[in-house]
Image: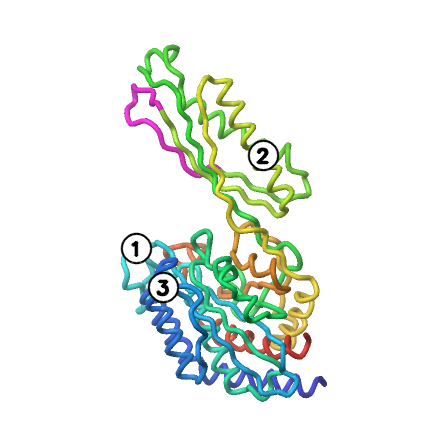
Amino acid sequence: MNTEHLNRLAGQIREHAAEIFSEVVALRRDIHLHPELSYEEVKTTALITDYLVGLGITPEPPLLETGVVAMIRGKHKSSKGKVVALRADIDALPLNEENLHGFCSLESGKMHACGHDMHTAMLLGAAKILSKMKDELAGDVLLIFQPAEEKAPGGAKPFLDAGLFKKFNPSVIIGQHCFPNVETGKVALCKGSFMAATDELYFTVTGQGGHASAPQKAADPVLAAAHIITAVQYLVSRVVPPHEPAVVSIASIHGGNAPNVIPRQVTMSGTMRTMNEDVRSLVQEKLRQTVSHVAQGLGVEAEVEIRKGYPVLFNDLAVTDFAELFCTEYLGMENVLKSEPIMTAEDFAYYLQECPGTFWQIGTGAIQHEKSNTLHSPTFNPEERALEIGSGLFAYAALRILQFV
């Protein structure tokens, strides 16, 4: 396809995105006002369904109790068998919002603090743009509004287990996530391992309680817990190869309720992040051994539970190269950045295990980034101008990928 036609196509989508901007903002604010936690997104599912039906797009039969899947059928003669998937997540977080704008959450203890309201509105905007441009589609576009990204096991794997990809067989899948440390108007892409595998760690240390004045008559689980916390830190520095990113953090510890009583039991929890499945398995094994040995040496018992979370999010190299090209076409070279791998996790990783694709950061921040404007913060406040950019970029990505696959 020649440059002139691509410029015309990009310009046409930009115009559509600008025309529907206020509508997409209204959608985002409606979702933001009424956040729903993972697996509870009933009203959000209804809002998405009603909007798509209003565009003449009939949602597919539900795969799960919440979430929506729908297909935009291209009219191009060569469309048979070619499908690109676009995904947005729809759930909120268990937080009380502390912003002061006029559309703060109306639900106590619930807030869209990770941008999923933005993602959902962007994909709805892209759906409206693409519904006007079916003649340009060299294939079909699968819209995935996924529940429960924030709570393991997430919504992606249950969607896949329910037959999502077996039924629709996409050739490529694309996702985007709000990032306040990336300036609005820009995107950042990363080839290969982009986000970490995540595992939750739970420890129960059991000893013999007693009077704090006679520790020799007790088996102190507090002391053992302290040694365990110190010991597991060696895993990253002495077990993991220096060139492999890894994090082990103990984030909570609970035990005892009096200054003169050695408790019987202490519980701890934490997280482990790795960028390599072999390293992940190695650290899990060594962690269990370390905790067991420390506990045995101090005369207590320790149980370790590792709840396996999302896998490494690996962006397909060829798809990410092509994404860099079409993002540049749509946004301009100066607005397409390269991202370093990050240790956050995303269940989009499950889709990428089954289908080539890429997941990028879409900027929602200002040049002078506010420290309080961070993901999972009660003051997270993305710039809404990103809705216009994200809607248009989603639509342009679908059109360009269908020409490519």
Q: In the rendered structure, which amino acid carries the disc numbered 2?
A: Glu
Assign the C terminus to one quadrant of the image: bottom right
- Residue beneath the point at 44% across and 85% down: 56
Disc 3 designates what residue? 41
Q: Which of marks 2 and 1 is in front?
A: 2
**In the rendered structure, which disc, 2 or 3, sits on the residue that comes first in sequence?**
3
Q: Is residue 286 left or right of residue 295?
A: right
Q: Position of residue 29 (x, y in %)?
A: 36, 71
Q: Distance between the residues labelled 2 and 3?
A: 37 Å
- Residue beneath the point at 68% across and 72% down: 325
Q: Where is residue 38 in the image (x, y as percent from the top left)?
A: 39, 58
Marks 2 and 1: CB-CB under 8 Å? no
Q: Distance between the residues labelled 2 and 1?
A: 37 Å
Q: Distance between the residues labelled 1 and 3?
A: 15 Å
**In the rendered structure, which disc, 2 or 1, sits on the residue that comes first in sequence?**
1
Q: Position of residue 244 (x, y in %)?
A: 66, 43
Q: In the rendered structure, which amino acid carries the disc numbered 3?
A: Glu
Secondary element at image label 1: loop
Is residue 256 part of the magenta span, yes or no? Answer: yes
Secondary element at image label 3: loop
| Region in magenta | 250-264
Q: Is 36 above or below relative to 241?
A: below
In the picture, residue 84 is in which quadrant?
A: bottom right
Assign the N terminus to one quadrant of the image: bottom right
Q: In this view, does 255 lie to the left or right of 353?
A: left
Q: Where is residue 242 in the image (x, y as percent from the top left)?
A: 67, 39
Disc 1 designates what residue? 109
